[in-house]
Image (cartoon, grey):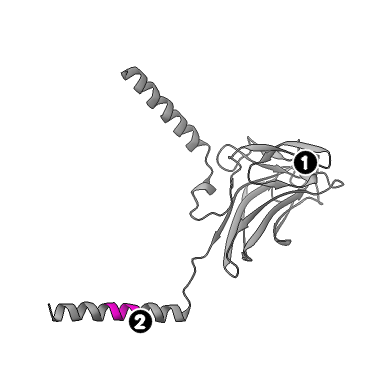
Amino acid sequence: MRKMLLLSAVVLLASAAQAFAASSICDATPGNLVLNCGFEGGTYSSTIGGFTNNSVPVDWVPNMGFDLEPSFNHVNSGNQHSGNFDLSIGNFDNQPLAMLSQTIATVSGDTYSGSFWAFDGGANGDPNAFLNLVVDGNVEVSLNDTVGAWSQFTFSFTGTGSDTLTIEAQTNPSEWYADDVVVTGASPVPEPSTFALLSGAGLVILAGMAHRKLFA
């Protein structure tokens, strides 16, 4: 029985260690709204326009351009910024644009901050290369082929209630790599009327406590 318990403990510890090793720094960011932010959460198969890609990251949605070239566009290991995996993305300049998207729930009117890490594996080899970070069709970050090492890029946007985050890229002769995608919202600030209401409620409570002490 002791051996069985010891073996179970070892298995549990090994599993925990493996899970910890597979986490990305973005997973530790409080309030991150992006699922599978470091591309550690597994893959699935997608077929669009007759093209199949068996390495689409879970919680992300590809377009036909992404499925067109699985050897370019896939969950990748070996170049990661953190964890064990990253995203490889980018078709040739003359091919349909490779795109990968995720829709996140937001609060309409609230301000959101985002960041991600990226670099061009074929840096300085293709003047037409680019990687864009797009929110609801608006390009928030646009990179060119001078990004030859992991670098962090930031952006911000106003929530609409449901916002779509998209990574799109093209490059020759190599691919772009992206990792650790983060979107967080600012803590909501109560309206002045709310402050007044809370202050009034606080005064009523304090007055009641003082009254009880006076006549206790």
Q: For the point 61% across and 52% down, which residue is it? A: 116
Horizontal relation, residue 50 to residue 199: left or right: right
Q: Is residue 203 magenta?
A: yes
Give the vertical position of 33 relative to 3 (above or below).
Answer: below
Q: Main secondary structure of the magenta part?
A: helix
Looking at the rendered image, the quarter that the C terminus falls into is bottom left
- Between marks 1 and 2 in the image, the one whose residue lies nearer the viewer: 2
Q: Nearer the viewer, residue 30 or 127?
A: 30
- Kind of residue at disc 1: Asp
Q: Residues within 10 Å of mark 2 (few under 14, many from 20)?
A: few
Q: Which amino acid is tagged 2?
A: Gly
> In which quadrant will I find the N terminus?
top left
Q: Which mark is residue 67?
A: 1
Residue toward you, 22 or 56: 56
In the image, the segment drawn in magenta is 200-205
The residue at 57%/68% (across/down) is 110
- Say what secondary structure mark 2 lies in: helix
Question: Percent from the top left, x then y, of residue 6?
Answer: 35, 22
Report if residue 166 lies within the magenta region: no
